Image (cartoon, rainbow, N blue to C red):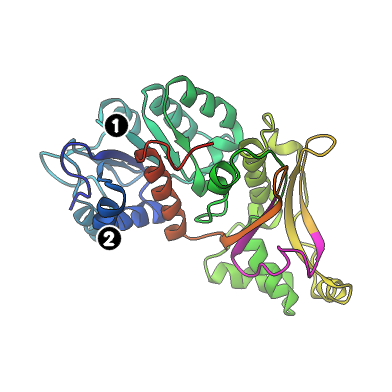
Amino acid sequence: MCSGKGEGALRVLLLGFGNVGRQFCEMLSVKANFLRASYGLEMCVVGVATRHRGSICASSGLPVERLLKTEEETGRVGVWEQPYIVGQSVDELLENCDYDVLVECTSPNVETGEPAADYIRKALKGKHHVVTSNKGPLLFYFHELTEIAAMHGVCFLYEGTVMAGTPLFSLARCGLAGSRIRRFEGIVNSTTNYMLTLIAAGSSFDEALRDAQRRGYAEADPTLDVDGWDAAAKVIIVAQAILGMPAVDFRSVAVEGIRGITPYMMDDARRRGGRIKLIARASLDEEPSISVKPEVIPFSHPLASVEGITNGALLLSDTIGEISIIGPGAGARETASAILRDLIAIETGGRLLER
């Protein structure tokens, strides 16, 4: 079933059909009636492109249940016959596919942000909205991409790039509209927060890492997570998108990971009335600053109780002071829900995006 056949449907071109892309399609299928009844929203996936598993598009829309079943059975998406067009490159799809919104959920490249940044540029310049869950392009090109979107009168939204499905950017954009946010503190990496939870319970660093890898919370090469660079990438995005900082050089940020944290250090922090957490900070106090490092925070701190793969953030505004938000920090379904919220915001004419 295509969740948006017919005139007036929001036509989606999907780049990436990994866990997040599949969950997004499943969500569209399950929630089609709810979206129609609650928001008057029809959505139609008109194209899907992958790096190694083919591509497919059809102006009339793709039946997402069949798409999911075919990919599960064959490992590919581009195996259908006419009227479906298969085998086009991403650039060809961006040029030829008739779509309204590019949903970009490919794997992040935190070295250059490419090629996803270039795909986003092309879509925006073609006057297409863009929704992404990929932090790579925002890490390197946030201001450029938002300026291109504004220049061409389209939306560029990215709720799923930080804290997965937890609506951090929506809180800042809508819930705190009219406020200046001066400071951010956050637990934004689920892998390290899960590991610190285990270390606090007596596990060594190596034991905690093996457990996280066994559960799929940590990569085979955990360097970006445990050395703090994933958290650094996310706080740079927050600093630019929420605090309004200018572009930040990724490698200039003061970053310290959790490799040196031991159960003894956790016990010592507990005796002193606190817990060790990997805290990402961005501040406009005195002069702009960004840092990521393990800190002892008191039990009374809103982030002290954030355990496991949960994430949390504390924002300081000039209107209501401190406000915190806690929620899922990882998960394909959670990230897909953020993509869906961004699409709803676009289709409702910006009513969910009012600044």
Residue 300 placement: quadrant? bottom right
Pick out the residue farthest to the top: 151
Q: Which residues are magenta?
A: 295-315
Quick check: 73 left or right of 213?
left
Q: Residue tagged by mark 2?
A: 30
Tell me the tag on residue 93. 1
Residue 29, position as x, y percentages in the image: 26, 56
Report whether 65 appears left or right of 106.
Answer: left
Please determine whether, in this image, residue 210 is positioned above or below residue 27: below
Alpha carbon distance from label 2 to label 1:
26 Å
How far from the left and from the top, in percent, is residue 208?
67, 72
For residue 309: magenta? yes
**Residue sitting nearer the eye, 316 or 272:** 316
The answer to whether 2 is drawn above or below residue 262 in the figure is above
Looking at the rendering, which quadrant does residue 193 occupy? bottom right
For the residue marked with disc 1, what is the amino acid? Leu
> Can see residue 71?
no
Residue extending farthest to the bottom is 202
Identify which residue is drawn at 17% across, 36% down: 7
**2 or 1: mark nearer the eye:** 2
Residue extending furthest toward the left: 82
- List x then y, in percent, for residue 181: 69, 41
Q: Residues within 10 Å of mark 1 (few under 14, many from 20)?
A: many
Q: How many marks?
A: 2
Residue at 31% in and 47% down: 53
Instruction: Name the one closer to the observer, 177 or 73.
Output: 177
Instruction: Choose the circle earlier in sequence order: 2 or 1.
Output: 2
The amino acid type of the residue labelled 2 equals: Val
Q: Position of residue 271 (x, y in %)?
A: 88, 77
The answer to which of 74 and 34 lies nearer the viewer is 34
